[in-house]
Image (spheres, coloured by chain):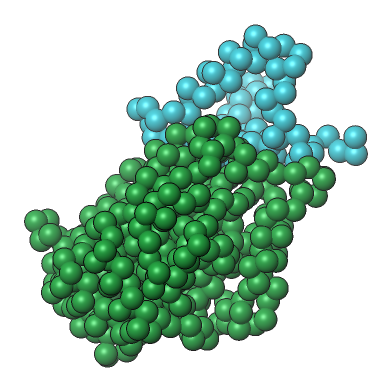
Amino acid sequence: MSKKSLKGSNHDFSDSFIQLDVLNRPSANGEKFPSFKEKVSNLGFKPFKPTGIDILQVNVGKMCNQVCKHCHVDAGPDRKEIMTRETMRQILEAIKISKVKSVDLTGGAPEMNPEFRWFVEELSALGCHILVRCNLTIILANPKYNDLPAFFKKHKVEVVSSLPHFSAKRTDAQRGEGVFEKSIKALQLLNAVGYGMPDSGLALNLVYNPSGAFLPPGQESLELDFKRKLRSEYNIEFNSLFAITNIPISRFLEYLVSTGNYEAYMDKLIGAFNPETVSGVMCRNTISVGWDGYLFDCDFNQMLDLKVGTKNQHISEFDTNALENRNIILNQHCYGCTAGAGSSCGGEIA
Amino acid sequence: MNSYYDPADLPKFGEIAEFQPELAKKFFSYYGDVFKEGALTAREKALIALAVSHAVQCPYCIEAYTEGCLEKGADEEQMMEAVHVAGAIQAGSALVHGVQMMNKVKEITM
C-alpha cells in the first residue's frame, strides 16, 4: 500500500478540477451519465435548499497517521494542512451566533492537530454536543495519545470510528497492514473507560464502508453481525454501526479509475438512486468547515473545493441567514449519498 | 456477436420483457420476492444463489451474486465455502451414481 497521499505523489487526481472533469465526462460508449442536479430538480428540489444548520462538521486538518486506500480527504502523514487556533476561535464565535447544536470533528486524524484538545475544551464549555471521528490507531500511535479515551470521556465526546470489517484481512486491505489489530486494542481501551457500555452515556459508534466498488449492506443486519463477532472474539461493545457508501472522489476515484471499475460503479450508484433519500442528505442540515476556515456544503464538496454558494464563504464572515438560504452545490459525486438506503456521516438515510 | 457471453448483456436482463411482457413481469416480481428477507436472511439467500450459480455455471449469475454477496455483507471466506458446497454436491452427485454403476456391474457379472 502506498504511504504517500495523491498530493504527495503529484498524482493528477490531487487536482479537484481533474476529478470534476472525470465525474462529468461521458462514459466510454459516449453516453452521458444523467445529471444529479437534474435528477433532484425533477423531484421538485429546484434549487436544492438546506433545512437549517444543526451540525458544523469541522475538518481540523489533513494530517493522519494512516493512508487509507479509499480516503476522500487524501489524508496522510505527508499532509501538512492544519487548522490554526485563530480559525478555531472564529468557529467558536460563529457557533455562539448560530443555531448549531452539534460539532463533528474530523480530519485527517483530528487528534494530531496540536490545538485539538484546547478546541474540544472550548466547545465543551459552550455546551456543544461534540463528535470526534477517531481512526482508533491514533490512540496507540504515540504515548501522548494514550489518554485520549479519558479525555474524550471527560468532555462526553461521541466517538465515531471506522472499522470496515470484523475480519483483519478486509480491514487491513483498506486501511493498512496491522490496522485491525491496533483498532481492536483501541476499542478495548475505549470500552475500559465506559465507551459503548450500557447506561454509560458514552457513545461509541462504528463506521462500515465497503472495501471496494460495491454498495454497503443493510445497516441493521450488519450491525448485528458486527456486535456478535466483536463481542464473542474480542469482548468489545459498541452502540451503533453506520453503513456508509464510498463517494467517487479523491483516492477512491483513483482506485475506481485505475482498476477499471469507475463506469460500473457510477452505473451502480445511478441505478440505485433512491428518491426517498434526497430530503435527508446531510448537506441539508450541515455546514462543513475546511482547515483554512472556508465553508462547504459537505466534506466531499470541501475536497472538491466547491465552496458554499454565498457571498461570504469564510467562517470569519459566518452569516446564518445567508447560509440557510443558500443553494446547495451539487455534482455527480452526490449520487453516492442517494444510492440504495442512502448515505450520510451518520449512516443510512432511508 | 463474437461470443455467446457478453458482460454488457447482464444489465439488459430486464429486456427479456420486450418479447413477452406478461411472463417477464411475473418472473421479475417473483424473483424480487424470493430474495427479500424472510425465514432466510437476504445474505443467506445471496450465498445460496452464489453456490447455485456455480453449479449451473452461469457467468451472469456468478458476476451478479459475487457483487450481491458483498453487498449483503458476506466475506470472501463465506463465499468460497458456498462455492465448495456447490462443488461438494456436484462431486457427490456424480459419485452417488457410482452405486448405480456398481448395481449394474453386479447385475451383469458373475
Identify the residue at image location x=64%, y=11%: B23
Q: Is residue A85 above or below residue A128?
A: below
Residue A190 image-quadrant placement: bottom left
Return the residue nearer the eye: A192 or A325. A325
Q: How many numbered marks have been drawn onto this rendered protein structure?
A: 0
Q: Is residue A253 left or right of residue A153?
A: right
Residue A106 image-quadrant placement: bottom left
Return the residue nearer the eye: A191 or B107. A191
Image coordinates of residue A157 in percent, x first then y, are 21, 67
Query: What color does chain A have in the rendering?
Result: green
Split into 4 quadrants, where in the image is the N terminus of chain B?
A: top right
Q: Is residue A315 left or right of residue B66?
A: left
Image coordinates of residue A277 in percent, x first then y, are 44, 39
Image coordinates of residue A26 in percent, x first then y, are 77, 49
**Can the viewer see residue A99?**
yes
Q: Can you name the residue that lies furthest to the bottom here? A: A143
Return the residue nearer the eye: A238 or A289. A289
Q: Is residue B25 left or right of residue A29?
A: left
**Can the viewer see residue A139?**
no
Identify the residue at image location x=26%, y=56%: A99
Return the residue nearer the eye: B78 or A133. A133
Identify the residue at image location x=23%, y=55%: A239
Q: Can you name the residue that lies furthest to the top here? A: B22
Identify the residue at image location x=47%, y=57%: A297
Image coordinates of residue B62 in percent, x first then y, are 63, 41
Q: Can you name the residue that lies furthest to the right here? A: B2
Query: What color does chain B have in the rendering?
Result: cyan
Q: Is residue B97 left or right of residue A112?
A: right
